[in-house]
Amino acid sequence: MVDISRGGIVESSHQVVAAVANVHGEVLAAWGNADLVTFLRSSTKPFQGMPLVESGAAVHFGLSEQELAIACASHAGTDEHIEVTNSILRKIGLSEADLRCGTHTPYDTRTSKKLIMAGEKPSPIRHNCSGKHAGMLVMARYLDTPTKTYLEPDHPVQQQILHNFAEMVSMATDDIIVGIDGCSAPNFAVPIRNAATAYARLMDPGQFSTERADSCRAIVSAMTAYPEMVSGEGRFDTLLMQVTSAQLLSKGGAEGFRGIGIPPNSLRPGSPALGVALKVLDGDLGDRAGSVATIAVLEALGVLPAEERQHLKQFDSRPILNQSGLRVGEIRSPQTARDDFNLTNE
């Protein structure tokens, strides 16, 4: 639980389900029901980006690591983000007009204010998923398939993504629930334990073919080398990867989901790669609980030293200030994750 207190009592609570798994699908630690089936939402993006590398499309069109990172991103819509996304589109002879992601106000406040002052409306290239969609269009071009229907679930691009994801989560494609994401692309629901397993395999893909292993390593390298592309300045995923010196991979999704990849040897010499999957059951629409829970889990696992955690204090257990700046309560995890978890790996 992540609690919101005021006047010495709990005013609201967010229930969080989390699981930690290794590459073999073994759940080493759990908080709540690890068999809960839920959508990964944007935490699916690293796996949606992998076919770009595995198919040869990324090399064929000369995509850079920075462009691979934006293809796995929920970016903030800054000028830098759209410049990288446009670079992808130019390489395949397409433009913003070919994106089918829709529009929303940029997450970056300064960018949003700048657009308002300039009298500009939000456009698809500013959408947080535009990089992912550009990557899907790269695949459509490479496979010589229609670009106008690239989001249809039966399109070759989406089928390749689905089969790739199924192998990463060790499930048959027919057992994966497919829904439509906020950006109109297919998205997948699987048990929390399977999502955690996929993130562990992303960090240690040794069990796969050379092509699959190379694609996993390329995605991890791109996202951790360019964390500012994955989310944006001052946002949680970007900051977590920056303060841990690219030792952790983090990708959040809507409705309170987050996936974390922990590489081998992080807990201790010889420790295995681990994946963490978390879901805030109420959707965490105020973005209050997900980061607190994530930090608590990483602290419990011993992969987030105190000096690194300090740099994340605005996302950690913290005081609540009212509009006059008075401290009126706090947001916190009432117990440490180490107390709540059944740490079977100890």
Image (cartoon, rainbow, N blue to C red):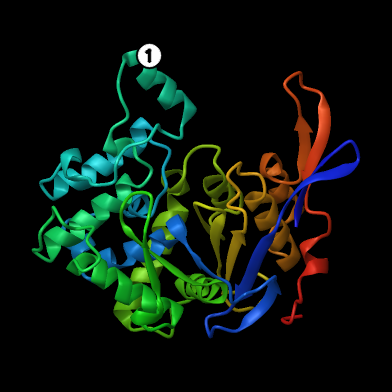
278 shown above or below 213: above
Q: Is residue 307 left or right of residue 37?
A: right
- Residue 96 percent coordinates (x, y): 20, 39
Residue visible at 75% across and 65% down in the picture:
300
250 shown above or below 268: above
Q: Is residue 102 left or right of residue 311?
A: left
Q: Which residue is mark 1?
A: 117
Residue visible at 34% across and 79% down in the picture:
173
Q: Residues within 10 Å of mark 1 (few under 14, many from 20)?
A: few
Q: Is residue 345 left or right of residue 22?
A: right
Query: Looking at the image, which is closer to me, 279 or 132?
Result: 279
- Residue 85 percent coordinates (x, y): 28, 43
Query: Looking at the image, which is closer to me, 226 or 119?
Result: 119
Q: Is residue 64 visible?
A: no
**Image quadrant for the N terminus?**
bottom right
- Residue 256 percent coordinates (x, y): 57, 54
Residue visible at 28% across and 38% down in the picture:
125
Tally of numbered discs:
1
Report the residue that reaches farthest toward the right.
8
- Provide the secondary structure element on which disc 1 rests: helix
Going by the numbered disc 1, the residue's amino acid type is: Met
Q: Is residue 87 visible?
A: yes
- Residue 210 percent coordinates (x, y): 32, 81
